[in-house]
């Protein structure tokens, strides 16, 4: 199976390449426009010159079976369009694009080409979060905080808060009939944002504070007098009387802990089986993010 990896930044090097490079069925091809990075990463993986490509045309000439896109978000629409037009099943880092119109166009193009398009919402595969889907979920609370990183609202929401939005959508136990957004901006920069989703018998809250003093990610689901908490995707704490703590094993890779390995293998399994994956549900997350962006701008106007 010929698999291309486009973009060789931190996320590709730390999370995706360690998974792809050890798969015996994968013939890995790399592409980036930075020659020094291409050679350094390819050398570390012992890839021959024929699997190193300086431009997308050269990569597409390899007749790929699948591709992973880890390039900057700004160029996602251009790259993903080329891949889908060539009929290459494509896995792309979130978000698909900064603008909802571009994301919608890509999802529609994939459907027209009957070609798989998957978006990297790895938390849907993270073991701790999957376990939360089996827990009573009358109240869901997710916090994903940073230190000293206020940012342009659209960039912050689409690049980072989108994980919170998608995780809430993944975990809510029924249809959402109420959406509320609160935020604080100063000087055009978003400091914090709160999203509330509510439906029959449940409330879900997503919080991101870019001036929290701590870099952390905490998920809590509770109901029926019991609570499950996941801290930084690594530690699962069940509260029912005395808390019970389950920590990530010392030898569990970070990519597996964060659900990236599982997401990659699920995508490759679908490609091998000839199953076409739809990004229509991922588009619903982008649509909700756009709603959050608009609410933030309205409040700061």
Image (cartoon, rainbow, N blue to C red):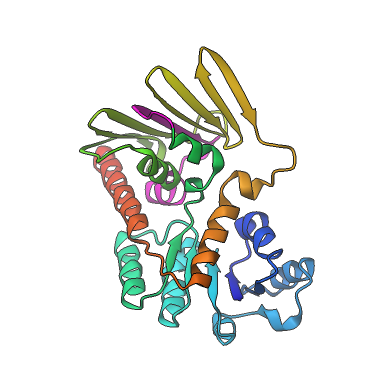
Quadrant assignment, res 68: bottom right
Q: Percent from the top left, x then y, of residue 241? A: 51, 12
266 within the magenta span: no
Q: Residue furthest front?
A: 273
146 within the magenta span: yes
On the question of residue 71 being in view, the answer is no
Q: Percent from the top left, x then y, of residue 37? A: 70, 68
- Which image quadrant: the N terminus? bottom right
Q: How many marks?
A: 0
Q: Percent from the top left, x then y, of residue 235? A: 60, 31
Q: Residue at x 38, y 50 (%)?
A: 154
- Which image quadrant: the C terminus? top left
Q: Residue at x 49, y 71 (%)?
A: 273
Q: Considering only vertical position in the picture, is 25 above or below 291?
A: below
Quadrant assignment, res 76: bottom left
Q: Percent from the top left, x then y, of residue 96? A: 41, 61
Q: Residue at x 44, y 35 (%)?
A: 134
Residue in the foreground of this view, choosing between 120 and 32: 120
Quadrant assignment, res 251: top right
Q: Which region shows up in magenta?
A: 135-161
On the question of residue 276 being in view, the answer is yes
Q: Residue furthest left?
A: 177
Q: Answer left or right for 25 relative to 188.
A: right
Q: Considering only vertical position in the picture, is 228 above or below 89?
A: above
Q: Considering only vertical position in the picture, is 185 above or below 5?
A: above
Q: Residue furthest bottom?
A: 61
Q: Answer left or right for 284 relative to 243.
A: left
């Amino acid at each position: 199976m010929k698999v291309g990896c486009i973009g060789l930044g931190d996320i590709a090097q730390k999370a995706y390449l360690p998974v792809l490079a050890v798969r015996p069925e994968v013939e890995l091809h790399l592409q980036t426009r930075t020659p020094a990075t291409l050679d350094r990463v390819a050398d570390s993986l012992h890839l021959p010159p024929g699997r190193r490509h300086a431009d997308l045309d050269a990569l597409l000439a390899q007749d790929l079976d699948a591709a992973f896109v880890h390039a900057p978000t700004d160029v996602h629409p251009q790259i993903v369009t080329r891949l889908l037009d060539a009929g290459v099943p494509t896995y792309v880092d979130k978000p698909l694009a900064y603008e909802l119109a571009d994301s919608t166009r890509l999802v529609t193009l994939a459907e027209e080409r009957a070609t798989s398009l998957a978006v990297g919402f790895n938390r849907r595969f993270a073991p701790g979060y999957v376990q939360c889907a089996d827990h009573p979920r009358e109240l869901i609370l997710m916090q994903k905080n940073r230190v000293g990183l206020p940012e342009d609202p659209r960039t912050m929401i689409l690049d980072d808060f989108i994980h919170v939005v998608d995780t809430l959508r993944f975990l809510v136990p029924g249809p959402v009939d109420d959406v509320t957004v609160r935020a604080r901006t100063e000087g055009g920069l978003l400091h914090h944002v709160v999203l509330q989703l509510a439906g029959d018998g449940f409330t879900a809250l997503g919080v991101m504070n870019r001036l929290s003093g701590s870099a952390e990610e905490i998920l809590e689901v509770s109901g029926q007098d019991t609570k499950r908490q996941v801290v930084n995707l690594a530690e699962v704490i069940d509260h029912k009387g005395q808390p019970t703590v389950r920590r990530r094993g010392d030898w569990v890779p970070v990519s597996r802990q964060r659900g990236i390995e599982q997401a990659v293998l699920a995508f490759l399994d679908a490609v091998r089986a000839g199953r076409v994956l739809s990004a229509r549900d991922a588009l619903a997350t982008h649509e909700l993010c756009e709603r959050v962006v608009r609410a933030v701008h309205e409040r700061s106007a």
